[in-house]
Image (tube, rainbow, N blue to C red):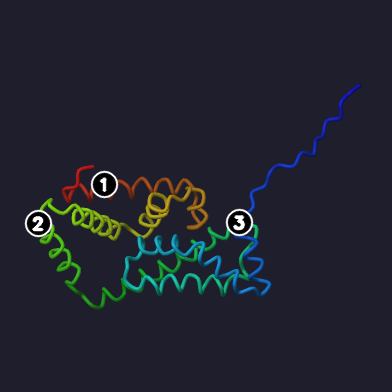
Amino acid sequence: MFKTVTTNIEEPSFTDPDLQLVQACLQGDPHSFKRLYQRHQNKVRSTLYQLCGSDGLDDLVQDVFLRAWKGLSKFRQSAQFSTWLYRIAFNVASDRRKALAKMRSRNISVEDEQLENLSDDAIGREGNSQPGLNQMHYQDLMQRGLANLSEDHRSVLVLHDLEEMPQKDIAEILSIPVGTVKSRLFHARSAIRKFLEAQGVEL
């Protein structure tokens, strides 16, 4: 007797954990969008902070979710909601940085330099007696290093190294090939390393 072999074995498919909430939102359930907000707002906030800094951060987070709410009907449910949301966050960050660049071009200010000198002086006075200050100084250096990167390099470094996103997802968020993600990541890491070494940080 020959045994019957089943050939139509179903492959396990990946289901977006947010899809059910998205569908409920589209059917008029406002509480579902609140759950999406609660699920993703910390990561969105962290990403925006690394890309734009702390100034106006609450408004930026609100802008991201407002755009997501208004554009939810255009969301392709075959895609990942989180990837779509982070693309919105990237666009908000990009708009913010462009607006700040225009403001700086019109208003030359020494505020950043003054803050930098104050921070360095404070660290110098305290020495190594307060590790918390050293940690704050390092975080300040990282923010300054990120600010020195181009928007393309900064975005890839933040999403990959700080937010720990896969390169495939980053490529989709930024609408670039995976190879470009790898190239930008290499150059961004190299630039950050050189900046930190120039500031006396041993790596």
Q: Which quarter of the figure has residue 57?
A: bottom left
- Frontmost of labels 1 and 2 is 2
- Eyeballing the image, is 174 above or below 3? below
Give, as a three-letter code, the residue at label 2.
Gly
Query: Residue 27: percent from the left, percent from the top?
Result: 68, 72
- Eyeballing the image, is 193 above or below 101? above
Give, as a three-letter code, the residue at label 3.
Pro
Give, as a three-letter code, the residue at label 1.
Arg
For label 1, the crowd category at 10 Å Cα-Cα, with few meaning under 14, some 14 to 19 and many 20 or more, is some
Query: Residue 175: percent from the left, percent from the top?
Result: 51, 57
Front one among 49 and 178: 49
How far apart are the alpha carbons under marks 1 and 3? 37 Å
From the viewer's perspective, tell me whether residue 11 is left or right of residue 145. Answer: right
- Eyeballing the image, is 180 above or below 66? above
Q: Earlier in the sequence, mark 1 or mark 3?
A: 3
In the rendered view of the protein, which quadrant contains the C terminus?
top left
For residue 124, the mark is 2
For label 3, the crowd category at 10 Å Cα-Cα, with few meaning under 14, some 14 to 19 and many 20 or more, is few
For residue 193, the mark is 1
Point out the residue furthest to the right here: 1
Residue drawn 42% across and 45% down? Answer: 182
- Eyeballing the image, is 29 above or below 173? below
Point out the residue furthest to the front here: 129
Residue drawn 21% across and 55% down? Answer: 132
**Mark 3, residue position:** 17
How far apart are the alpha carbons under marks 1 and 2? 22 Å
Query: Residue 173: percent from the left, percent from the top?
Result: 50, 57
Q: Earlier in the sequence, mark 3 or mark 2?
A: 3
From the viewer's perspective, tell me whether residue 50 is left or right of residue 61. Answer: left
